[in-house]
Amino acid sequence: MIKGVIFDLDGVIVSTDQYHYQAWKKMADIENIYFDEKINDRLRGVSRMESLNIILENANKEYTKNEKIQLTEFKNEMYKNSLDNLSSEDILPGINELLDDLKKHNILIAIGSSSKNAKKILRKIQLENQFDAISDGTDITKSKPDPEVFLIAAQRLGLTPNECAVVEDAHSGILAAKEANMLAFATGDAKSSKDKDYDFEQLTEIILKE
């Protein structure tokens, strides 16, 4: 029986994709590195440094470790500044109602996000106190598809992995959920993943009507 639902943040609770893209694009333009939305799609659910390494596949030079750190810090500052524009109006449709339904049925809820800015985003959209646990990029050493972020969330909920379901919009997140032995619900681009268990729209039916 599912006793907890772990939500990815970006693309599931709120969409900040455009802010990530704009920040990476500015960094890439300054470095004269080709970067487009197709490349950006490969960054979903991936850590900041791994995202940079993907972008640098198109670079004309090699970057030192310190230079890479500086680039990720620049990108993150650009991104964090853009998050100041977020508000509760940016919560994706149906999320508030779903969270309320899960709570009414005594289902625990958590965030499992690779983002190191997860807590700031939750504050800006006024959901920081709605979740029973938060696991984010500040807690992990391995990004999705490694299951670490979801396993930490389950532990903080006091649940075993097979008592948890995950909601993800990235294929890497679906893989992480399955590796963690959790039920995987897909939304957005993740709906095309052959590894998903169900689509997001089936979550209420599957979990609340068990």
Image (cartoon, rainbow, N blue to C red):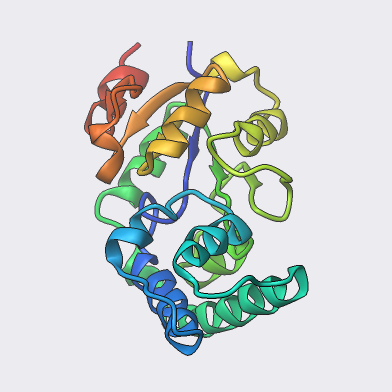
Q: Quadrant of residue 194?
A: top left
Image quadrant for the C terminus? top left
Residue 78, x across and y down, in percent: 53, 84
Apparent side of residue 171 relative to residue 144 in the rendered image (left or right): left
Residue 25, x across and y down, in percent: 40, 78
Apparent side of residue 88 relative to residue 149 in the rendered image (left or right): left
Q: Residue at x 34, y 41 (%)?
A: 98
Apparent side of residue 112 relative to residue 93 in the rendered image (left or right): right
Image vertical order of residue 160 relative to residue 130, above or below? above
Total number of numbered labels? 0
The front one of 125 and 84 is 84
Q: Is any part of residue 62 visible from this angle?
A: yes
Residue 64, x across and y down, in percent: 73, 71
Q: Residue at x 70, y 26 (%)?
A: 158
Residue 109, x across and y down, in percent: 52, 37
Apparent side of residue 92 relative to residue 53 in the rendered image (left or right): left
Q: Residue at x 46, y 31 (%)?
A: 166
- Which residue lies most toward the right here? 66
Q: Is any part of residue 106 visible from this angle?
A: no
Q: Quadrant of residue 162?
A: top right
Q: Residue at x 55, y 49 (%)?
A: 113
